[in-house]
Image: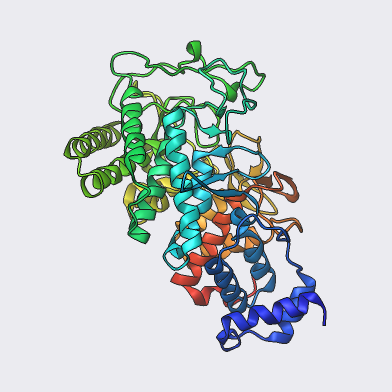
Amino acid sequence: MTLARRQLLKSLALVGSGIGLGFNPIQGLAAAEVFPSKRPLAKKFTSKAVEETIQVLKAFLPDKELAWLFQNCYPNTLDTTVDFEIKDGKPDTFVITGDIKAMWLRDSSAQVWPYLSLAAKDGELQRLLEGVLRRQAQCILIDPYANAFNKGKTGGGWKSDRTEMKPELHERKWEIDSLCYPVRLAYGYWKQTGDALPLDETWKKAAQRIVATFKQQQRKDDNGPYKFQRNTEVPTDTLPMGGYGNPTRKIGLIHSMFRPSDDACTFPFLIPANLFAVRSLFQLEEMALSVWKDQTLANECKYLALEVQQALEQYGTVVHPVYGKIYAYEVDGYGNALLMDDANVPSLLSLPYLVGMDPADAVYKNTRAFVLSLDNPFFYLGSAAQGIGGPHVGADMVWPLGIIMRGMTSVDSSEVTQCIKMLKASHAGTGFMHEAFHKNNPKEFTRTWFAWANTLFGEFILKVYHENPQLLQQQF
């Protein structure tokens, strides 16, 4: 018996009742030979709960190529990107993005988020997640304006950028979501596990720094302490106006100089990021009251959230001649608005997923219709796929992140099915998701190792499995 066959039979024993879910072991053996695992033999971290989940889904899915993609992608963050250790008696987890050996606050949060629901039944996984929380708090205290960090004081990265670089920083592009994602992860961890231990005094100081930074970037009195310029031929990699970005009217919104794609904003009030900030501030308010017993901090979070929320209601939407009232992507407070969406999250498309917006909300429905149309300059319609891209890697490149988010936020089974089909067809024989691929040719792709897209794909399939399992009982 081959090693592959022995491993597959061992996997079947783990789920026990998998055959009862409609799994044929003979078909399974054939599938194992046709679709050999792309996971590394030497894994960075293995979670019992994650492995059991993989086996359950493999047994349940009749589409063996889809099952193979899930097996490769869902554990990719744990398999390849986490560096978990105990420092001074506490967990510490450094998470790289994949082929870039640095830790983005956004990406690291999003990469491990799909494992949160399993943490309560896997102590080692919970400790790894605790380590991410602790590492992120330290990063925020080093510099709340940085988006990406080195593991230590190693320098490198973009150290020549004209901003206040430190040896711990890989890059210092100020993005609102870089501070929102760690709040989302900390709040989600606390709610899922009931464990407030990592939300210690260090995390409270990080929370205070987040609030202070948001206030600084309202820029009510002056431009604040942050500016950024880079010697580059790529205009979206630097900021105009002496590094402070394009002019704005001070209306209470928070300036974000870069998007979650790491591209410079055209107008510094990035609407999906400000909506994300409101959500994060209300979560910080709850943690301040329940965990830190700090009414002053709670009030500060609440009042700032309400101020930004009010400004969003007044300035965050426009009336489109075709779609009616929709959210703008960016505004400047002077009446100028950028109408588009980018595949990177937070996006306008992602609002139900990321900030809890009702998919039936009229403005969101109008916005969704716009961003999934050719009226969005970064929506591409090709022979291989249709979906949202962005300026980051150029025209005609569809991002799996956008297709996944479309499926994650859809209430239409046929649309969900369409998204799964496109994603299945996009891996170009690699067994993984990519950063982007050409709308007419999935073999023309960027980034072979992009863990966020891989793990988010796994989260998408699991969401469908839990909410509409029969939809997965087909060949895609």
Observer-nearest of 353 and 32: 32
Observer-nearest of 44 and 215: 44
Observer-nearest of 450 and 368: 450
* Screen quadrant of the N terminus: bottom right
- Residue 108, relative to residue 315: is it above or below? below
- Which quarter of the figure has residue 2? bottom right
Observer-nearest of 369 and 145: 145
- Residue 391, relative to residue 441: is it above or below? above
Residue 6 location, x and y as percent? 75, 80
Looking at the image, how many numbered discs can be counted on the residues?
0
Residue at 55% in and 28% down: 169
**The furthest residue to the right:** 1
Residue at 56% in and 39% down: 103
Residue 274 location, x and y as percent? 36, 36
Residue 158 location, x and y as percent? 62, 24
**The furthest residue to the front:** 88
What color scheme is it?
rainbow
**The furthest residue to the bottom:** 20
8 relative to 137 in the view: left or right: right
* Screen quadrant of the C terminus: bottom right
25 relative to 409 in the view: left or right: right
Residue 373 in view, yes or no? no
Residue 380 location, x and y as percent? 61, 45
Residue at 33% in and 57% down: 191
Residue 272 in view, yes or no? yes
